[in-house]
Structures are given as structure tokens and as C-alpha cells.
Image (cartoon, coloured by chain):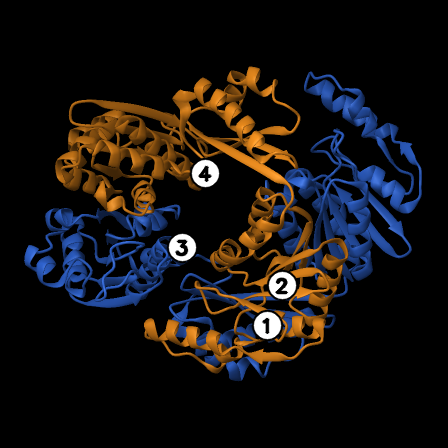
Chain colours: A blue, B orange
Amino acid sequence: MKASIVTIGDEILIGQIIDTNSAWIGQQMNKIGIELTEIISVADTINAIRIGLDQAASVSEIIIMTGGLGPTKDDLTCEALAKYFGVDMVFHNKLWERIQSMFAKRGRQTTDLHKEQCYLPSNARLLENNMGTAPGMYIDSNGKQFFSMPGVPYEMKYIMETHILPQLAEASPVHIIHKTIMTAGQGESILAKEIEHISSALPLHIKLAFLPSLSKVRIRLTGKSTADKTALETEVNDNADLISTTLSQYIYGEDEISLEQALGNLCLSTNKKITTAESCTGGLVASKIVSVPGSSRYFVGGIVAYSNELKEKLLQVQQSTLDNHGAVSEDVVKEMLTGVLTQTGADIGVSISGIAGPGGGSPDKPVGTIWLACGSFDKQVTKKLLLSKDRTLNIQYTANVALDMLRRFVL
Amino acid sequence: MKASIVTIGDEILIGQIIDTNSAWIGQQMNKIGIELTEIISVADTINAIRIGLDQAASVSEIIIMTGGLGPTKDDLTCEALAKYFGVDMVFHNKLWERIQSMFAKRGRQTTDLHKEQCYLPSNARLLENNMGTAPGMYIDSNGKQFFSMPGVPYEMKYIMETHILPQLAEASPVHIIHKTIMTAGQGESILAKEIEHISSALPLHIKLAFLPSLSKVRIRLTGKSTADKTALETEVNDNADLISTTLSQYIYGEDEISLEQALGNLCLSTNKKITTAESCTGGLVASKIVSVPGSSRYFVGGIVAYSNELKEKLLQVQQSTLDNHGAVSEDVVKEMLTGVLTQTGADIGVSISGIAGPGGGSPDKPVGTIWLACGSFDKQVTKKLLLSKDRTLNIQYTANVALDMLRRFVL
């Protein structure tokens, strides 16, 4: 069984809203083993909806529609469905009664527009929507199953969870198992090479994907089978374990955990307090650490020493070190680290100084040159990055490297 | 001219990532007057890509593809395009040289997989991607224009902005003029009421939209016409001026300028140095200030005093003030402000202490209670916010309020 989503609404096509509904529906379908073939977003016109339905039905047996069911003139899904199937619209009295009582409870008046919402294609079965006025619908036509829901996320979710997912889950014959391994500190192609002996030996029903972003790479295994679910799970997990063993030095977690969350968990389990001394990242590393609930248990605070004066005053960097080596140097980040550990009393810290760009580069130290130091009073490691010309990217990338250095040190 | 987007990648269909690329592309196409007909998301298989291309080409002249261009086995777009057009793959030596020099600069090794990335369909023109190894491509076939880009957002944006949008904009027959007015510190409905006399008098071809986000509201005027572009521009600008005059106290800029950029411009023109003392925002305000190129000319640095100990040690907050009023109080943020001005020597600062949540609330001070102080040694203003239960939202919202307070003070 394969499914397609058809989302209806100009607001998606002009980018005014991001289509989060489809991602959520994709996750849910995936969990019950139904493969999504396509997501198609179309405009608010009868013709665009017809084309979308034709395309979806040409590749799938299940067509899940969202949007275009509201009370206003630009909501055309009901009319489009009636025309698509060549049927009349019929009035649903039960729906009208529910809408009236809903409005009465809220002390509000219904309008003619609400009454018009109660006309549905004659071949549609009503899927009750207790979260709003727009109806859900189910149409069975020549072996294809069409579902229609409003685009408001919580109404859509209610109808999916109450009506559609239970109906589809019962009929689904396929099991899908995902396992995602989170890595940091190594590029996609090197990772791919190191596990080539595993990936080339994967059976056809298990797929491997690499998803890179800013110094991190997610490695995802997807197993699909109509046979024994437990056997599939074991098979996917065994391969994930093989990959984890081979790439252990780069792995910081599983299943969409963030670097800052992984770092936080380690700090809690090792009972370590951490701190940050930032120049070019300007507090981004600290703010990522603080984005994790409960971070006050291991993050004491940090210092953003953007000017050289503050590097000296707040972090006790020697003026001679700045003069001899420049602010972007191994010596300076080492002194920044010692300084912030002294000032804050934390066990482990990270320090960063670099040329984020677009200005400030020199032949000797081009834009994208970044130095980091990480460690305790006893032991420190340093790292030099040579990144791009893009300020935002350089800052974001460096922040992830800093979090990963902290994580490795706390480990 | 109509366009369709084809996004390639299982990660969208299984809901592992949300397709933000298409929303961004939709916005950009809209700005240059090209209507988006469909967004189609397909799986990582040759057959799925072929079907997606067929569907897109059946409704549009312009087909914009993202994804499937990486160096690993699951990246099949190049092969799919070659098969779709029935052409061979040819090696692009210039691309290979660029990748090698990019890696050499970063002190890293290329692999065979990178070399394979340099084989492109023979009918494709290379669109240089300075942000990564995956190539952009342009194929003109029977009057249809196909563009292919990697799915990594910043690489996609680079190729769109550098190559595709300029090429398409030149060919577009519709004039679309946008003017966006940026406001902070007042809600959408109050703003709408204050300019109702202007919005109700707008001609049909000029649309007004309110786009609220985290203490800011963007007010966007959109004029559309196939006639005289200059007349349209004048009409849109005149209405924008009327709105600007009416709402002047809330306006911080035009055309998608960020609060931090507006603040930076004011600091430069008034020659003021600024600083930050952050608790619950954890460095986010500082990192937003630093995200602006050239911020070293007015931002000296700041202190993230997350624990009470560091509030005392680094910001000279009195223990008695913490004991008597609690860390989240007007008295504490005032002392934090004085402390950070003393420590950094800046002219103007902002300080923040609050309960971001989800834990840490009390009946007296529920989650979402935030205190801010802003000013100089001579004059200070304070503000109390009562926000939501959501940690991320509270932190993001507060950071924007802090930037707006700094902006108003520097003004």
C-alpha cells in the first residue's frame, strides 16, 4: 500500500507558511508501515486540485488531502471533489447540528457560510472533526481511498489520529523500522568510506542515507519488510551496531538528539560543570547550551570577550600574547580558556577566537580561520579550523565544533 | 511563466525533515512575479524522480529541483537526469579542480566519491556552488527550463541567488513590488486598527499583510501589475510612507532588516558601545548582535551569568539583593546592568534574568516571568515580561525585546 499527500492552498506555494502538516503525516504513515510516494502541493483552484488528485492517484492507492475546507470563498476542496467524481453535493444535517451547538456553547452566531460547509460530495463518508467546523471526509472509489482534512494542524491531527490512522494501520501489511545515528567531527564521504564494507553488504530491503549539516552528519538506516517485524528490527539494529562500532569516535547519539542535549546528558552523568569563553561566536555556544532545559545544573555561565580589551580584562589574556600572536591564535585561545576556568570555577571550558568574516582577513589568516581550545586546568586540546567566507556559516559551524569538543572532553 | 518545484529525498517523505527549502523558493519566485504551480516531493529513486519530473513538466515551463546531489549512493539526481533526457554523463574538470582546491585549503583529503560528483549529464550547464561540493545545474530542453540544486539550505540559497533568480527575473513579464515595514513592541491587532484608514483605502492591486513573529510584526505591501513599473512603485511607496508616519513609534526599519542590524546601524551613527549581561537568554542576545558583520566596532562583549555565584562574582550583584528579591527581579537586573557597564566600559547595556522554563516556576513568579534592564550609568529603564510555558519561545522572544530596548536607548 502506497500513499500520496495532496496539500491545497496558495499560502504554501507562495511560501507564506511552511508545510509542517506533511512532515507530521509522513512520520505517522511511516510508523504504520505505509510508504509515502509523493507530497504534492497545489493552488486553491478546482483545476489545480483535479490535477493534483490525478497525479496522486496515478502513483498511490491512498490519497490524503489537507486544506481548502474552510468557510470562505477560496476554500474549494468539496466542490473540486464532487466534480472530480462526477457526483452531487448533499446536505449533512448532523454536521450542521454539531456546528450550531458548538457555536451556541461559545456564545457565537453561525452564518450562512457555516451552513454551506455542510454540503459534502454524495459519495463521501463524514469523518467527525471535534476540533472545528470543517469536516473530514472519506471516499472509496475504484479501489482507491481518498481522505480529506482541513489544513489547521490540530484539526488535521485530530482527524488523522481518530479516524484515518486506525483504519489504515489495520490494513497495512508492511513494517518499516528506522534507526538514526548522529555523528559530528567528520565529513560525509569519509564516513561513507569507513563503513563501505557494511553498506555494500546491506540486504536490498535495508537502505542507508547520509544527512549532513554544519559539521554534523546523520546516518539513517531504514528497513522495510512484510515478514516478521521482530526479525527486521534485529537486522536493522545489528547493522546500526556495526556502524556504531566502526564510527564510534564520531558518534554522539541516536535518533535526532542534538549535540547540546548529548553534552548536557554527559555533564549530568559525570557531574561536571562547564563554561565558555567566546569571541567570534559571540555567545552562540553558551546560548545553545542554555537552550536545553535543566542546563543550570551544569552550565555556570560564560564570557563573551569580543574586543581585545575584554580578553585582557575579563579573561586575563596577556597583552604580549595578543601582540606577538594576534587575537586569532592558539596561544590566545589557551589563555582565554585558563582565564574563563579561573573566573567561573567550572571544571571544563571551551574558548573560541576567529575571523568570522566577511572582513578582517589577511593573507596569513584568511577569513574563516578559527582557533578553539577545550579542557580543564590539567589538560587542554586545541583545534584550528579553516572555513568559508560566509559569516553565518562560520559561526554556526564553529559553535557545533565547540560543543563537540566539550562533549569529547566531558566523556 | 509558471514554475514547479521537485524536491528529492526520502527524509522529506518520512517527515524526518520539514521542507523549508520550498517555502523559501516560493517566496523568492513570488517576488519576481513567477507563479508556483506545484511543489512535488519524491523519493530517492530513479523512477520516482522521473515521475516527479514528468508531472512537474506537464504543468510548468520552469522546473526547480533540490536534493539528491551529494557524494553518496543514495544521491541519484544526476543519474536520473541523464536517463530522463537520454544523455551520457561527462566529467567536469573545472568542478573537480575547485573541489580539490577547496579541500586543500581546509587541509582535508578528497575521495573517489568526490570525483564521481563531477560527472554531470552532458546537456547540463554547471551552476557554480561556492558553498559546497555538490554542483548546481541548468538544462534547457524543448522550451522547458530545468534547474537542479543540492538540498542543503545554504547551498541551495547560494545557487538560487547567484544564478537562477537573476536569470528568471530578467524573463518575467509581471511587475511585483514589495515593501516591508518592520515593527517591534506592539501586537498585530493594535497595529491593524491604527492603520485601518489606510488599509481600507488601498486599490485592489495592492495587498496588505501582517506577519507577526516573536515580539516583531512585519507589515508587507504587495503591488502587482503588468503595466507601468514606476507608477506601481510610487503607489506602493506612498502607501508605505503613510503607514510609516502613523506607526513611527514602533518602526525600526524597512525591507527585512533585522533588529540587530538596525541596532548596529544606530550604534555606528551615534558612536555608542554596547554590552550585555544575560542569564536566562544564555548569550543569545550577544550572539545576535555579533551575527551582524562589523559588530566589533560597537559591541565590546558581554557576560553570561547563569548561576547566582557568577552574578555576584562577575557582575557584582549583592548577595543581599539576591536573597531579598530573588534572581528574577527588577533589583537584580539593575545591578547586573551596572555591573556589566563597569566591567566592560561600554556606554549602554542590557541585562536579563528570567524563568525560561519548563521548570523553576513558583506561584509568585510563574514560568515565563522575565525582567530586563537597559541603559547607561545615568539612566536606566526596566521591563517585566509575562510570557509562555515554552522555553525556546520565551528565550527567543526575550532576546528580541532586549534588542529593541537597546535600539530605543541608543536612538
Q: Quadrant of residue B174?
A: top right
Camera-side residue: A315 or A43? A43
Horizontal and vertical percent for residue A68? 74, 38
Alpha carbons under labels 1 and 2: distance apart: 9 Å
The vertical placement of A134 against B76, above or below, is: above
Is the residue under label 2 in contact with that under label 1 (CB below 8 Å)?
yes
Residue with the mark numbered 1:
B74
Q: Is residue B58 at all visible to an observer of this figure?
A: yes
Is the residue under label 1 in contact with that under label 4 (CB below 8 Å)?
no
Farthest left residue?
A320
Specify the amino acid type for callout 2: Asp
Q: Which mark is residue B10?
A: 2
Residue with the mark numbered 3:
A261
Q: Which mark is residue B256?
A: 4
The numbered mark 3 sits on a residue in which chain? Answer: A
Q: Residues within 10 Å of mark 4 (few under 14, many from 20)?
A: few
